[in-house]
């Protein structure tokens, strides 16, 4: 059955109270509560975002549809869609488990030993506090290292022009101003070193313990369990991000919260964290942390997951799409995500998810389909000005003025 946007409320499927198996596990109750809350508030959400121009993408719905709206042969075919669900949800958790095995003996255990050998960090504290100190300090160091490495890489290739063939198009007006970049980096560093550590120590650590996180020096779970934890992390993050992001685009609230993130129309990697505090908590922290919290994941898994998410979000905002590269072929880049989210910023029309399947189901990728999706975006389809290619915010490429 195909419903138009305006018919959506009448066509909404009846609720299924048993959609979540009736288990007493707290994480499932939490999930069940979340689903019930969304279902209960569908009419309100619908009204809040009811103006078609808020999406400018046609057939947005609140219940999943297998048939694209509008019908178009350009839409991914069912098999392609299935591939886009099954492959990432298998490959990404597998690679994440491998990543844990890489960092556990080389970074995690040495960091733990270092803390244990430090009288200030370890010996004088109570056992519980030692764990808390290690967790919070390691979290801050990990975040800082990932920030420097990933953003440093993108800064360097932008300045030197080493991978210009992978650069996404930018109009002169889309380049970020110096003022915006300074404001962005200042906020990130305040969050990392001033407000972040107390939040980790007094809020995230106790919350994680509440959900069953084991002590830092306990052994890792087996590979099967780690795979399931990561798979759940990816799924909860994708769904949580899609819906909170789509909510933040609702016409009545967009200008108060999410507009701040969209001040970057042509994003750079660190623009990922340029957002209003409400958005940071609702759309970044909650979806990202949901999986590791409800599973009571080992601290090393938490650090690995956060590092992966940070790398992903920096890359999808980088303005580079490495489609066709070797790293892309083996699944070590997020190039499809980079094209996908770049379209969201440059055109601000649909593409609310991190990947395509949720936008497909809920009808919010029509505009992206129209330009030929990632292939169209990276091959310059729809480009009106040939000079849009290769323009940089760091150097004069002879394609328009750089902003001061
Ligand atoms: Zn947005
Ligand atoms: Zn963004």
Image (spheres, rainbow, N blue to C red):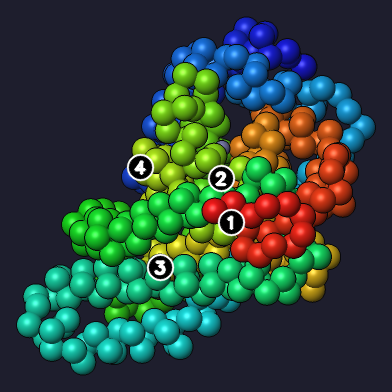
- The residue identified by callout 1 is 268
- The residue identified by callout 4 is 277
| Cα distance between the residues tagged 1 and 2 | 8 Å
Residue at image x 64%, y 34%?
348
**In the image: residue 400, left or right of residue 20:** right
Of 86 and 345, which appears nearest the observer?
Answer: 345
Q: Is mark 2 within 8 Å of ligand 2?
A: yes
Q: Earlier in the sequence, mark 4 or mark 1?
A: 1
Q: State the SS at label 2.
A: loop
Q: Quadrant of residue 30 in the image? A: top left
Q: In the rendered structure, find residue 143 and report the number of the disc placed on it.
A: 3
Q: Are marks 1 and 2 in contact (CB under 8 Å)?
A: yes
Residue at image x 44%, y 87%?
105
Q: Residue furthest right?
A: 73
Of 214 and 4, which appears nearest the observer?
Answer: 4
Q: State the SS at label 1.
A: loop
Above or below: residue 281 compared with residue 213: above
Residue 214 visible, this angle: no
| Cα distance between the residues tagged 4 and 2 | 17 Å
Residue at image x 52%, y 24%?
250
- The residue identified by callout 2 is 264
Above or below: residue 282 compared with residue 84: above
Q: Are marks 3 and 2 in contact (CB under 8 Å)?
A: no
Above or below: residue 272 compared with residue 160: above
């Amino acid at each position: 059955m195909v419903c138009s946007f305006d018919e959506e409320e009448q066509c909404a499927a009846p609720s299924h109270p048993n959609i979540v198996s009736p288990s007493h596990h707290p994480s499932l109750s939490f999930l069940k509560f979340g689903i019930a809350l969304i279902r209960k508030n569908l009419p309100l959400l619908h009204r809040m975002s009811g103006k078609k121009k808020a999406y400018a993408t046609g057939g947005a719905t609140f219940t999943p549809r297998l048939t694209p709206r509008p019908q178009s042969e350009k839409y991914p075919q069912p098999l392609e869609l299935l591939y886009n669900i099954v492959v990432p949800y298998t490959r990404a958790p597998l690679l994440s488990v491998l990543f844990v095995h890489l960092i556990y003996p080389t970074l995690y255990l040495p960091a733990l030993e270092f803390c244990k050998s430090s009288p200030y960090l370890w010996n004088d504290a109570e056992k519980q506090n030692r764990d808390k100190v290690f967790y919070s300090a390691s979290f801050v160091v990990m975040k800082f290292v990932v920030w420097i490495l990933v953003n440093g890489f993108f800064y360097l290739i932008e300045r030197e022009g080493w991978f210009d063939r992978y650069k996404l198009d930018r109009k002169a007006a889309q380049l970020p101003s110096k003022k915006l970049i300074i404001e962005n980096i200042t906020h990130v560093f305040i969050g990392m070193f001033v407000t972040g550590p107390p939040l980790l120590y007094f809020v995230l650590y106790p919350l994680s313990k509440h959900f069953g996180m084991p002590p830092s020096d306990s052994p890792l779970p087996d590979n099967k369990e780690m795979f399931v934890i990561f798979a759940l992390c990816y799924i909860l993050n994708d769904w949580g991000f899609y819906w909170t992001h789509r909510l933040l685009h609702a016409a009545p609230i967009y200008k108060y919260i999410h507009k701040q993130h969209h001040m970057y129309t042509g994003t750079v990697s660190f623009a990922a964290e340029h957002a209003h505090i409400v958005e940071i908590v609702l759309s970044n922290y909650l979806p990202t942390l949901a999986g590791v919290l409800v599973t009571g994941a080992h601290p090393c898994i938490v650090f690995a997951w956060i590092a992966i998410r940070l790398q992903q979000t920096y890359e999808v905002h980088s303005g580079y799409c490495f489609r066709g590269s070797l790293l892309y072929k083996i699944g070590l880049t997020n190039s499809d995500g980079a094209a996908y989210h770049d379209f969201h910023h440059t055109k601000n029309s649909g593409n609310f998810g991190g990947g395509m399947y949720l936008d497909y189901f809920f009808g919010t990728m029509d505009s992206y389909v129209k330009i030929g999706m990632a292939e169209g975006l990276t091959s310059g389809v729809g480009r009106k000005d040939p000079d849009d290619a290769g323009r940089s915010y760091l150097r004069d490429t002879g394609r328009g003025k750089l902003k001061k």
